[in-house]
Amino acid sequence: MLKRLVQSCFIIIGGTLGIFLLPVVLRLLNLHDIIFLNNPYVTAILGAIIFYFITFWTVDYVVGFVKWFEDSVVKAPITEIISGSLGLIFGLLVAYLMGIPFNNMNIPIVNTVIPILLTLLLGYLGFQIGFKKREELMNLLTISRSSKKKANLEVEEEKKVTKSLKLLDTSVIIDGRIADICQTGFLDGIIVIPQFVLMELQHIADSSDALKRNRGRRGLDILNRIQKELPIEVQIYEGDFEDIQEVDSKLIKLAKLTSGIVVTNDFNLNKVCELQNVQVLNINDLANAVKPVVLPGEELNVQLIKDGKEYHQGIAYLDDGTMIVVEEGRNYIGKRIDVLVTSVLQTSAGRMIFAKPKLLEKAL
């Protein structure tokens, strides 16, 4: 197929050259007096026949060259082809613009030869420059997009790192539930333990009071578990704020400087953080959020264990520690009864359920 295509091209070229060049050759040979040779159709046919016979000796070389060029183009990376083509187009465009003044000149050699030389020279230089500078050209096309994307990623990464700092206070460490929360993966980011919090824990652990001493040691054990057993990064903040005395105030100051999040179960510290626009996570809020929802009108079976603040009240507790205030329940202390929920009070300090004995409801 390729061989026939090459032969067809040779025939077309021969016919074209026969029309334009064969009459000149005939004049040089003094054969222009032959009438039928002056016919353009005859010269075209003669030129085509001549070039057709030439193909018997040259077609194999031309086909080999075409196949070599095809293999070279196919094997070349697409970046080299694109960059070389862009360079060639740019070189030809420059050659055309530079050749316009010479085309307008009336000097025979200048207006024909120089534009051709410019086209060949600048086309070749454009292709070579585009081919050899392909990496720089591709980088130039993508540098603006990549730099912008990189800048956005750096900003997002910086925000992510600063906002993911979780600052633990003394109360939440002693509480112990923070270790279970970290283990479940609900608390991500970097856990930060300030040095002044560790000093307060050590002071509590060295207290002469047995209860405080046990609480402090429990807190140190929790920190040791978080640091060694759980797959979460823990950092110790060595700095201190000597002009501030209270540990909670130091913690709030550190949270402001690092854009960190305070993790606590201290109700008062929670309120102070909210007043000072410091983000805070209260694990009591988390615990209340995952507690079973109790709606007014539901029936519960509870055991009253003590009396309430009011004379007629009795106090009971659910399995999760939620306190239930039973109106008119004083007479049932020590007994297990069915109660009907009347209202639910939800606060950061916990949840309180108000109820009344079901026996009284039936009596009414």
Image (cartoon, helix red, strand yellow):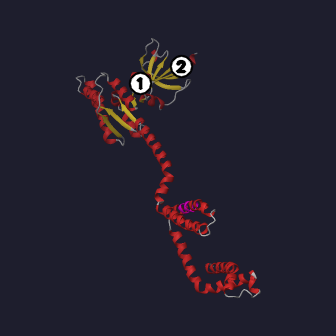
The residue labelled by disc 1 is 273
Looking at the picture, how far across and down is residue 51, in whole percent?
Answer: 64, 83
Can residue 29 be seen here? The reply is yes
Q: What's the residue type where badge 2 is placed?
A: Leu
Looking at the picture, how far across and down is residue 274, in whole percent?
Answer: 44, 24
Query: Going 44% across and 22% down the picture, which residue do you hit?
Result: 275
Taking depth in this image into account, of 25 and 148 the one nearest to the observer is: 25
Q: Which mark is residue 109?
A: none
Magenta stretch in the rendered image: 86-93
**Label 2 to label 1, Cα distance in Å?**
45 Å
Query: Does 22 appear above or below 82?
Result: below
Query: Going 31% across and 38% down the picture, which residue do you hit?
Result: 225
Query: Does 15 appear above or below 187?
Result: below
Taking depth in this image into account, of 95 and 129 the one nearest to the observer is: 95
Looking at the picture, how far across and down is residue 204, in whole percent?
Answer: 27, 26
Residue farthest toward the top in the current orientation of the protein = 311
Q: What's the residue type where badge 1 is placed?
A: Cys
On the rendered image, what quadrant is the N terminus found in?
bottom right
Q: Which mark is residue 359?
A: 2
Q: Which one is closest to the eye, mark 2 or mark 1?
A: 1
Taking depth in this image into account, of 66 and 22 the one nearest to the observer is: 22
Marked residue nearer the N-terminal end (2 or 1): 1
Most common secondary structure along the magenta stretch: helix
